[in-house]
Image (spheres, rainbow, N blue to C red):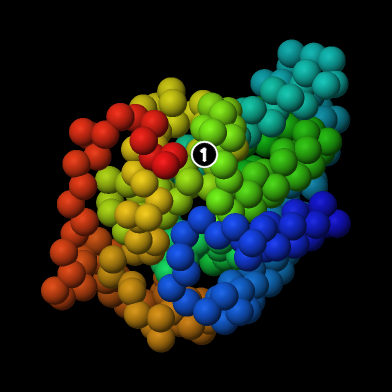
């Protein structure tokens, strides 16, 4: 917890000093709203996920269940492999939250933010987190995740998610180097773009390896051409706290890809740009 609070505080400070993208909404209104959504989500996690993962990881370790427990590896190696495999299976889960319509209804709440910063990293609808408990249970039992491995992965993931959602302008050269291994703010900014082809890329949450292996890595989009958000949900007054919590349960889902009347889809000859242009 001190690690998370420290990382969040440091990123918020850096976001003020060196912002990467220009903001649309007032920072304080957004932070308050996103932290409120996050508060509800945190309660849901404590009630729905914690009891399941606590018991399941203990059982996995005691009975030597799952892949890594069967291999009986030295502890540090087991933890490292568990972190990598959890990271990969989270990539798969992330794709599912976009591809499965009823899961997208929940994940949409995260994507409908009109700006992207460290507070967006915490803005997940409680329903998405409750749905993910079944996936987490499968991850733990198939991979064979011990309590220690799960704790290690959760800490790393939290810091990674805060970092790559943040609106911090890093030196381009540094970001390029980091991006060889881990997800960076410019890379994840592309995943939060209004343009569908850009949204359907960069699903990784930790290592960029998974996007590289699946051919879903997209780096050739300059940040100042990106509009953050989802086309069907662009009005700030429709995206208040209560509206966000109710959004997944709306009777009819609006086409998230429909552009508002009069708006032109951004036309960009991305394929003409060299692959590492993005990072500019
Ligand atoms: Zn997403």
Q: What is the tally of numbered marks visible in this picture?
A: 1
**Relative horizontal placement of residue 252, taking residue 276 as reference (left or right):** left
**Relative horizontal placement of residue 123, taking residue 249 as reference (left or right):** right
**Relative horizontal placement of residue 35, taking residue 274 as reference (left or right):** right
Q: Quadrant of the C terminus?
A: top left
Q: Judge whether 231 appears above or below 84 on screen.
A: below
- Camera-side residue: 53 or 194? 194
Residue 75 visible somewhere in the drawing: yes
Res 13 → quadrant: bottom right
Q: Residues within 10 Å of mark 1 (few under 14, many from 20)?
A: few
- Camera-side residue: 208 or 67? 208
Res 37 → quadrant: bottom right
User: In the image, residue 169 lies at what x, y percent?
Assistant: 56, 51
Residue at the spot 83% in from the left edge and 36% down from the top edge: 148
User: In the image, residue 222 lies at what x, y percent?
Assistant: 36, 46
Q: Judge whether 35 appears above or below 144 on screen.
A: below
- Is ligand 1 less than 8 Å from the beta carbon at label 1? no
Residue at the spot 43% in from the left edge and 23% down from the top edge: 213
Q: Quadrant of the N terminus?
A: bottom right
| Residue bearing the label numbered 1 | 172
Residue 41 visible somewhere in the drawing: no
User: In the image, residue 155 lies at what x, y percent?
Assistant: 75, 45
- Camera-side residue: 196 or 150? 196
**Secondary-structure class at tag 1:** helix
Residue at the spot 43% in from the left edge and 73% down from the top edge: 24
Q: Judge whether 118 appears above or below 221 on screen.
A: below
Residue at the spot 46% in from the left edge and 42% down from the top edge: 187
């Amino acid at each position: 917890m001190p690690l998370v609070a420290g990382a969040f505080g440091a990123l918020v400070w850096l976001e003020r000093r060196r912002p990467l993208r220009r903001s649309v909404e007032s920072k304080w209104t957004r932070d308050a709203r996103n932290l409120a959504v996050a508060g509800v989500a945190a309660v849901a996690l404590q009630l729905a996920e914690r009891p399941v993962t606590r018991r399941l990881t203990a059982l996995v370790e005691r009975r030597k269940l799952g892949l890594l427990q069967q291999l009986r590896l030295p502890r540090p190696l087991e933890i490292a492999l568990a972190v990598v495999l959890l990271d990969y299976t989270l990539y798969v889960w992330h794709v599912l939250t976009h591809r499965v319509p009823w899961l997208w209804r929940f994940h949409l709440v995260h994507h409908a933010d009109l700006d992207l910063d460290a507070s967006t990293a915490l803005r997940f609808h409680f329903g998405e987190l409750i749905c993910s408990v079944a996936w987490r249970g499968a991850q733990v039992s198939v991979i064979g995740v011990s309590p220690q491995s799960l704790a290690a992965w959760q800490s790393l993931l939290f810091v990674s998610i805060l970092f790559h959602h943040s609106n911090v302008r890093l030196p381009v050269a540094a970001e390029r180097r980091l991006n060889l291994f881990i997800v960076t703010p410019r890379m994840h900014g592309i995943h939060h773009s209004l343009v569908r082809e850009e949204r359907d890329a960069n699903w990784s949450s930790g290592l960029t390896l998974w996007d590289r292996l699946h051919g879903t890595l997209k780096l050739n989009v300059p940040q100042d051409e990106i509009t953050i958000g989802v086309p069907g949900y662009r009005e700030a007054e429709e995206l208040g706290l209560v509206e966000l919590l109710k959004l997944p349960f709306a009777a009819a889902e609006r086409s998230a890809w429909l552009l508002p009347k009069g708006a032109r889809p951004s036309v960009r000859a991305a394929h003409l740009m060299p692959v590492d242009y993005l990072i500019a």
